[in-house]
Image: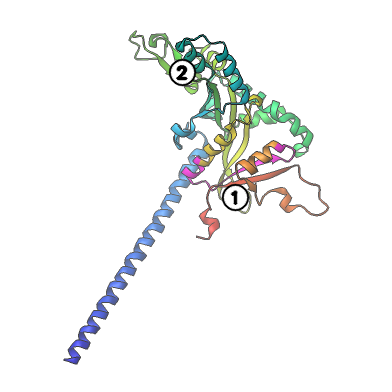
Amino acid sequence: MKKIEESKTRRMEIGKSCKISEKKKSINKKEKWERSKRKDDIYKGKELIKRIKNCKDDDNIFDFIDDSTYKKYILRIQHEDVTKKKEKNDHLKNGSIEKEKVCQHVEAPFIYFESVNAYELKKFSGSDKVFTLLFEMTKINMERLYNDSNFLNKGWSDDKKWKELQSDKCKLILGFLQHTNEENEYTFDEKKDHPSDPTNNGEKKKDRLSFLQIIKQNDKNKNDLEIYLSKHKLVCFVHYRLTADYPPYENTTVCYLYEIQIAPAYTKRGIGKHLIDMLKALCTRINIPKILCTVLKKNFNAVLFYKNKCSFEIDQSSPDNFASDDSEECEYEILKLDVYKHPMKDGN
């Protein structure tokens, strides 16, 4: 009897051991599958990054991030806006309809964002107007800083900045000012007024076109872009590229922020932070580990913005990390914003 019980006990122990072994095998198999899937995802991600980096697939940032969250940004109302609203209301008649109209007129405007690669933009005749606006905004904001810092021992160069903005690798986010009592897009009163519409049936129907749609058909309707830009001022833009990280991580692609420019009248209203959030969302979506940018040390507002408001830090590639006691201080530093820890740097 005792031997029978011992035999049963052994069988139960063996059974438990087999189940544990099978469970371990199942876990190991699952982990192996997950590792394999992660490698596949990384490979697919690399292929996607390669296409976006190439800038010749007519891609834009809103293909990869939530346009309902990022495409429209309502400006913070500044003190002068509130004052104007009060002055308007002080002159109102008692009629509630008139009051409502004025309140609508003075409500905070918003920025409507468009995204396009310079390679694509250059195909259209109206692109010179847009590049001129980008260049002029950059020159107003940066020329003095470049010269005061003697940036790269050269200072400001019109030719160099033109080439940067029109490079085939340049990716752009453009911000156009609009008001709450205006349509989000350029509007034709009647669909039949638009000659490029193949479904022209003479019906009176509003046809809204975005900036990109307008510039693509600008050869047919020469005045449309001028009208759009006169109604919707270009007040900010971002120039970024997907490029190789600095050594020893040159096999990793990063998002390099070349320019974030905002017209002086629209600074300190949250636009810059919104634009950085857009780039972070893109990097998260397509597995880019970090954002890099070069900032002049004399550009105190930019340094505070990146470090304090956006949590950028000094990148290990920044020149000051390699300075010797007798070397001159570099006029710029390279900042980074880690989006996630890259698996190749994590040892996995």
| Residue 220 position in % (x across, y down) | 48, 13
Left or right of 304? Residue 218 is left
Work out whether residue 295 or residue 179 is closer to the camera in this orientation and state it.
179
Q: Earlier in the sequence, mark 1 or mark 2?
A: 2
Numbered badge on residue 272: none
Q: Secondary structure at mark 1?
A: loop
Looking at the image, the residue that sits furthest to the bottom is: 2
Q: Nearer the viewer, residue 146 or 8?
A: 8
Q: CA distance from mark 1 to mark 2?
A: 45 Å
- Locate residue 226: give its quadrant: top right
Image coords of residue 212 (percent x, y): 49, 23
Please name the residue shown 76% across and 45% down the image: 330
Instruction: Residue at 37% x, 12% y: name it.
Output: 205
Camera-nearest residue between 11 and 274: 274
Front of the two marks 1 and 2? 2
Query: Which of 96/84 is in front?
Result: 96
**Residue picked out by circle 1:** 250
Circle 1: residue type = Glu
Specify the amino acid type for callout 2. Answer: Glu
Label 2: element kind: loop
Give the farthest residue toward the front. 94
Q: Which residue is mark 2?
A: 183
Residue 277 shows in the view: yes
Q: Find residue 308 and report its horizontal and vertical position in percent.
A: 64, 43
- Side (left or right) of 110 relative to 163: left
Magenta residues, start to end:
281-300
Q: Which of the 4 image quadrants contains residue 125?
A: top right
- Residue 123 in the magenta stretch? The answer is no
Q: Is residue 291 magenta?
A: yes
In the image, residue 189 sits, relative to residue 256, either above or below, namely: above
Instruction: Work out whether residue 128 can be spotted.
Output: no
In this rendering, the answer to whether 3 lies above or below 63 is: below
